[in-house]
Image (cartoon, grey):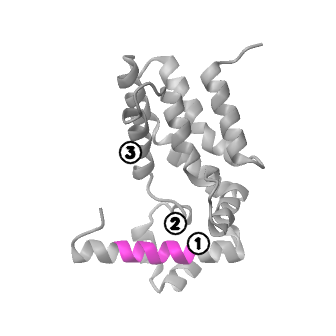
Amino acid sequence: MPPTGRRERKKAQTRQALADAARELFLEHGYDGVTVAQIADEADVSIATLFKHVPDGKEALIFDDGVERREALVKAVRDRDPGTSTLRALRAFFVRRGPFDPDMSPDLKRLRDLIVGTPALGDYQRKLWQSAEGVLAEAIAAESGRDPSEPAVRALVRYVLEVPDLAGREPDPLHALHEIFDLLESGWHD
């Protein structure tokens, strides 16, 4: 839902201007070749304003705050079609996102390559996925009649939340995603 009040709209506009400036500069000069001062200057705001809107630093300018991804993961589990397993629903969720989307625009491919090639951005993205651990464990437990603190539930959640990072770094991310989910669905066999 878009911000409704004037103050909220201004905050959202500033945040978007910062994100746009950061993305443009990172793609042009590389993540490590850009300072927060350059981003602030490009967005026509002060450095103090940048940190007010993005206290986590310049990594946060490439990503959302993680709330949408947590909500979407839970929705994928809770709203799956009858007869669809939790893992099938989560696979379908990931297939439509980021590096796995077969219809990704060239700009998004460049952004994906930047994230994969920049350790600080990869680490930040991994943190965002890991921030969904608790809510995803709750959703899976509720749907399966298990306790979210059970080691099997926690392990499954952790494996699933590692998929974007592991598969996203492969030359064919979509193939890697399917390979990982095939293993998760069938189990490891020697």
Against 89, is 46 above or below? below
**What residue is shown with label 3?**
71
Left or right: 167 in relation to 39: right
Task: Confirm whether residue 157 shows in the render.
Answer: no
**What residue is shown with label 2?**
61
Residue 49: name its quadrant. bottom left
Against 30, is 97 above or below? above
Give the main secondary structure, helix, strand or loop, of the magenta stretch: helix
How far separated are the C-alphas under marks 2 and 3? 20 Å
What x and y, as percent, mark residue 128? 51, 48
How far separated are the C-alphas under marks 1 and 2? 8 Å
The mark that comes first in sequence, 1 or 2, is 1
**Disc 1 crowd, CA 10 A, few/some/many (<14, 14-19, 20+):** some
Magenta-colored span: 12-23
Secondary structure under tag 1 reads: helix
What x and y, as percent, mark residue 190? 78, 13
The residue at 44%/83% (across/down) is: 45
Left or right: 171 in relation to 45: right
**What residue is shown with label 1?**
23
The residue under label 2 is which amino acid type?
A: Leu
Q: Residue furthest left?
A: 5
Secondary structure under tag 3 reads: helix
The residue at 59%/54% (across/down) is: 98
Q: Is residue 169 part of the magenta span, yes or no? A: no
Q: For the residues labelled 1 and 2, say whether their Cβ atoms are less than 8 Å apart.
A: yes
The residue at 64%/64% (across/down) is: 111
How far separated are the C-alphas under marks 3 and 1? 25 Å
